[in-house]
Image (cartoon, rainbow, N blue to C red):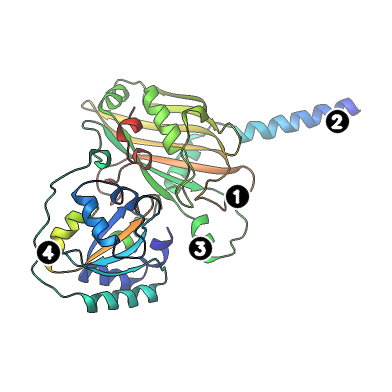
Amino acid sequence: MIDRALIFADPVVVELIKTKTIPVAIDQWNQRRQKDSEGEFYRKIAAQGPRHDFENGTTQGLYMAAADGTFLGYTNNRSPERIKAFFDDAFKKHHPADTAKLKVETQDKRFTYQPPEGGLVVRVQTKVLSGYEEPETAFAQIFQTAVSRDNLWLTKEEHAALVTGRFPESAARRLARYHLVDNTRGEGPLWEQRDLVSQQITLDNGKITGHVELKTPNGERSYSADLLGYLKVSQGKIVELNMVARGDFFGEGQYTGGAPKGKFPLAVSFTLADGTDIADSIPPQGSRGWVADYLR
Amino acid sequence: MNKQRVTSAILAFLSVASVTAAELTEAEFQKLHAEVQQDNTALWRTVPWRTSVLDAQRAAADEQKPIFIWAMDGHPLGCT
């Protein structure tokens, strides 16, 4: 959120990226772990920078590298002016040269994410509706107004069930555990199965209604949400799905500090993805490293 | 008198509780679904982001440009 609001909102920075670089956006949690061609090339670059504890620490930040993996620079600064200086320095170090294209020789299946064939991808967006105190910093202001984004994957079997007018229990459970989360200020903690106190989501003549209760055993986080939505079926497929969850959320996670005090209203929107959005292709946060478990 | 006050207080509490726990109305659904959407016109979206560093490597070799990596915890095109 911070990067988008500060670095990538600067027209000069964006123009430099578009015209002078090959831009790539990754969740480095995967690349620093995956034992395959993709991971090896990423680690080759990151190992030349300041963050190279691939087992225990994040390597997040902004990198510039030549096509052969030569390191050209790293920064984790969010000031557009510092980013421009970082670019200038990297461009000076870059010497265009013929370089062999790397092939995908190995693929670590733990980190190979493909939406289920015949299934559905649903956009999930989340927002805190109110409850914040006056922000003390520009960063806090950005977080307090943020709309987060993830994707919900549904399997072929769940798609078929929805077509026949039934909201499958597996889809309801996945939706609750992995997508009714407050991830508006960073990576929000997902829910464990034990946190799912109750869930009831039903589909009747194209109308989705439901209620979900989530609460950690120690009471540090909870969410009590009502759901309402609609879907349309055409020629045996879901062609439209719009839904909203709204309720009172309580608590925060290790990376989502600064939540409103007490209970606060949180809403989550669901929209069938059509592949036109830049984020439609990203895997669900809950599927990290274990897609099969996410889809169970 | 006291009993009346207690009854009034209970009724007031139940009234507030029912508002808090009220099911979503059609109008609320429409409003929230429109409100809880990212800004599709944001500048960062105009960048042709790739999502694989190997894909980027091949393009960089083709075009003889450097690779710019936006590496985050959580996918940068998504939640963070």
For residue A139, which numbered disc appears in the image?
Answer: 3
- Image position, residue A204 (x, y; %): 40, 22
* Residue hosting label 2: B5
> In terms of image quadrants, where is residue A107?
top left
Real-space Cα separation, disc 1 to disc 2, in angstroms: 33 Å
Residue at image point 30% right, 49% down: A279
Q: In this rendering, do the residues under marks 2 and 3 share a single chain?
A: no
* Residue hosting label 4: B61
Q: In this rendering, do the residues under marks 2 and 4 share a single chain?
A: yes
* Residue hosting label 1: A260
Whether label 3 touches label 4, CB < 8 Å: no
- Tell me if B11 is positioned left or right of A205 in this view: right
Element marked by disc 4: helix
Real-space Cα separation, disc 1 to disc 3, in angstroms: 15 Å
Looking at marks 2 and 4 on the same chain, the residue that comes earlier in the sequence is marked by: 2
Quadrant in the picture for the N terminus of chain A: bottom left
Of labels 1 and 2, the one closer to you? 1
> In terms of image quadrants, where is residue A82?
bottom left
- Going by the numbered disc 3, the residue's amino acid type is Phe
Q: Which of the pair A104/A185 is nearer the observer? A: A104
Crowding near the residue tagged with mark 4, few <14, some 14–19, many ≥20 C-alpha atoms within 10 Å: many
- Going by the numbered disc 2, the residue's amino acid type is Arg
Crowding near the residue tagged with mark 3, few <14, some 14–19, many ≥20 C-alpha atoms within 10 Å: some
Real-space Cα separation, disc 3 to disc 4, in angstroms: 37 Å
The subunit letter for the residue under badge 3 reads: A
- Tell me if A197 is positioned left or right of A98 in this view: right
